[in-house]
Structures are given as structure tokens and as C-alpha cells.
Amino acid sequence: MSTACLTIQETADAVSTGQCSARDSIQSALDRADALNPKLNALLQTLHEPAIRAATEQDNRRAAGDPMPPLAGVPIVIKDNMCLQGSRTTCASKILANYESPYTATALEKLIVAGAIPIAKTNLDEFAMGSSGENSAFEPTKNPWDPSRVPGGSSSGSASAVASRIVPGALGSDTGGSIRQPAAFCNLVGFKPTYSTVSRYGLVAFASSLDQIGPLTRTVEDAALLYHAISGSDPLDSTASPHPITNPLTNLHHPIDNLRIALPSVARTHTNHPAVTRALEHTIKALTNLGAEIIEVDLPTLDHAISAYYLIAPAEASSNLARFDAIRYGVRAEPKKGDDLFDLYANSRAQGFGPEVQRRIMLGTYALSAGYYDAYYRRACKVRRLVKQAFDNLFQPTNPSLACHAVLMPTAPHPAWQIGSLADDPLAMYLEDYYTVAANLAGLPAISLPAGFCHDTADHPLPVGVQLIAPAFAD
């Protein structure tokens, strides 16, 4: 039985009812990975032996009459900035090219306990720094809808693998839109949970106050399944919230009475691609037809969020990536006669980090330097507080009857662009995060949903997405 077109729920049901063995499900996914990955470069490492071994163990349990976990036999892929014991965790960087993780990330461990089986580690922008999938040290990932175009980033390989039907679901990480933007470019559902609802233990840090693990799937139900499996407190992560997590599947198909959705005026900016504007208008019409009330609001802090993000995130990256010194682990430059310890650090990091990572480290180090800390980093943190307050004012106004349930915006201002077309314009690339970074700064849950296609391109129709941002813990 081929599981290529099955959702996560359908795959789990097929395995639990005996229509398909766990081994057949996993082998089918591995066969697709072997066939498609040479064209897409979505996977950095395929886990053939451990995946088949885990599937065989599940089949043996079922044969023995033991209860099966809810996601038994479901193949998944994991972004290669999450640790999996016994596999390489490279972050798509030369500096970690041969690093083998001694432990497994908590979110992934929970998914494995639920029965899901990792079959591969996926490509990404190096250390999750990028919006296109082009910044990998191991060549760019390609978009299955049009291999000449980017799949979005930084969870590029995870999105490409799900969109190409290698697997029905994947884990990515979202620091400024790195789950939602590739979901929009690849016609997927991408969900960034509330900050702290999913443990970050075992996720290689980019910006610790912004990073969040979440799912990429083809349906909302599948996203809810994966989120439910990976969420919850963790004694290994001091930032993981003890807040009780409500099962998102409980009311998934129940409509919300008197649904009120805020639409920021800036979401209709003329800088959007026409296809993005059309998708947003179609979404507004569909929601209105379903009984939702669309309320146009001013959210001027969005204009400042992108600037604040590109100070805060690089500052935290500068601090987090200081640990990669080529002394304890990682690539080490060949010493030259007369080199001292500083030369070893500098040469190893210059050879190990790619251009975008180096750019962000330098930006962050500058923002944190003694003469500029107050002018840049401290001011960006104050703007971050204003961004959160702006959302709070929409979700928790003084008059509860005016409270909005969610905020609607495009996921990205443009559909996927040609590989290489923005490579020499980092500012244009950063502006593609305009709609996504605010949710990370405020720590709010946000989901990107497929919203149609752009037919303005000569070769292939390109997916377009819209996103909904909700109050904290309203995942």
C-alpha cells in the first residue's frame, strides 16, 4: 500500500487497523526520499537502518497484541538543527559538518514516544538564518512546485519534503517566520506555537527568546496532531511553560461563535505582490461568508517590528554562536606557523561559518558593543514591548466585547522567487519577513494556511499563504 498521498491521520489509521504495516509505510517514504531528494536537495541525511528497525519493532508489538502509540508507522523528517541521538546535527553548516549528537531533542523524543518515525534530517538555511533555503553549506533546497525557485526558509528542507509527498509531516523551527514562510511557498500548513509551549531543549539555538519548534503538514488536523504530541512542560528547558496545554483536536471542527478577526491596514500595502493581495481578499470574503466579522485596525508597530527583529535576533545569535570555537567540537582550521589562540578562533570561524551567518554575527556584535548597546539593542527591546502591547490591545481591550480572536495578514509579501535572484540583496531578503517577525517578538501562536496560487509566472503556478495570529496560549 502506497502512503504517498495519505495524511498523518490516515497513515496512523492505516497502520493501526492493519491495512498497512509500519515497515511498509516507512519503506514507502524512504523509497520516495531516495527517488526525489536528488532533484530537491531537501534531505541532508537519510536514516534508513534506524527507521526500518523502529518500524519492525512496532509491527512486532502489534503482532504480540500490545497497544500501539497513536502515531505508529507515521514517517516524519526533522530540520537538521534538532538533535537526534546517533545522527549528525549539522545545522547545514561546515563548522558542524561531522558533529554527532549524543542526545535527542525533547520535542522529537515526545514525537518518537507517540510512534512517529524519523526517516531523515532536512536541509535548512545555515543555523536557521535565512528566508529562502539558499544559505545552506550543502547547496540550496528546491521548491517542488517549481525547482527553479526557493522553497522558503529557513525550514526549507522540511517544507520541500512534505510538499513533495516524501512524508506527511515534518518538524521545523520558527525564529522570525521560518516555519510559516516556507509553508506559504509550498502550499502547506505551518504552525508556530506560543513561545514556551514546546521545549527548546535539543534545538541548536539561533535566538533563544524567539526560537520555537513547530509542525509543517498538509492539513490543519495533522498540524494539531503533531503539536499535541510535542507540546508540554520540560524540566530540561527552564523557559518551557508549566501552563496546561489544551488538546487542540478537541474543538478543531467546532465553529467559534461571533468570530472577530482583526485586519491591519498595512496588510493591504501596495508593496504586496498582486497575487498576495488577491489571496488576502479571497480569504476575507470566505471568512465573511462563514459568519466572521472582519475589523480593520491600525497596527503601526508592524513597520518597526522588522527593524527590531533584525537587531534582537542577530544580537542573540552573536552570543549563542560564540560557543562554536573549534576547540571542543566542530571544524578546526589548520594552524599556521606563528598562529596564536585568537588566530585559531578567527580562522576556524571564518572557514566554518557561511556569509549570512557571519553577517548576522557581526550585526549582533555591533549592536551589543559598549558604545551602541543603548542606541540599538536596548531600543529594539523597547520596540518589542510595544509590539506585544499592540497585540494585547486587540486581544484584551478594556471592553471585552471588542476583543478579537485573531489577526489576519499575508504570510509573505511575495510568492517564491527564483533561486539566486535576491542573493546579492540581503535587505530585500530581510523584508520578506515583514509579516512574520511580529508574532515571534510577541511570543504569539501563528499559523500559515494555503490561500491560492499566483498564476502571474510563466512556468508554474506558485502557492500563496495567509496567516492568523492568536493570543498567547490560544494555540
Image (tube, rainbow, N blue to C red):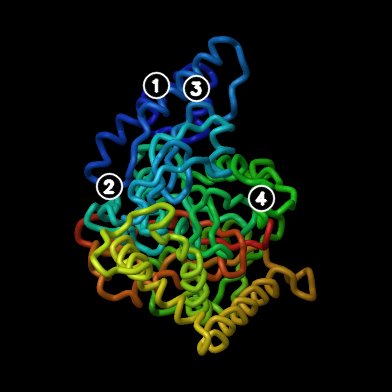
Residue 64, given in percent of the width and then of the height, sits at: 57, 10
Tag 2–tag 1 contact (CB < 8 Å): no
Observer able to see residue 300: no
Q: Residue furthest right?
A: 399
Observer able to see residue 315: yes
Q: Which amino acid type corresponds to the residue marked 4 in the rendered image? A: Pro
Say which mark, if any, is on residue 24.
1
Q: Which amino acid type corresponds to the residue marked 2 in the rendered image? A: Asn
Say which mark, if any, is on residue 41.
2
What is the crowding at mark 3: few (fewer than 14 residues within 10 Å), some, or many (at least 20)?
many
Q: For marks 1 and 3, give the CA distance.
A: 9 Å
Task: Please name which of the two marks, 2 or 1, marks the residue nearer to the observer.
Answer: 2
| Residue annotated with mark 3 | 15
Tag 2–tag 4 contact (CB < 8 Å): no
Q: Residue at x 25, y 35 (%)?
A: 35
Q: For marks 4 and 3, give the CA distance.
A: 31 Å
Disc 2 on helix, strand or loop? loop
Left/right placement of residue 365 relative to residue 264 reads left
What is the crowding at mark 4: few (fewer than 14 residues within 10 Å), some, or many (at least 20)?
few
Q: Residue at x 69, y 56 (%)?
A: 473
| Residue annotated with mark 4 | 255
N-terminal of the two: label 4 or label 3? 3
Task: Please name which of the two marks, 4 or 3, marks the residue nearer to the observer.
Answer: 3
N-terminal of the two: label 2 or label 4? 2
Q: Which amino acid type corresponds to the residue marked 3 in the rendered image? A: Val
Task: Please name which of the two marks, 2 or 4, marks the residue nearer to the observer.
Answer: 2
Disc 1 on helix, strand or loop? helix
What is the crowding at mark 2: few (fewer than 14 residues within 10 Å), some, or many (at least 20)?
many
Residue 121 position (above or below residue 332): above
N-terminal of the two: label 3 or label 2? 3
Q: Residue at x 38, y 78 (%)?
A: 271
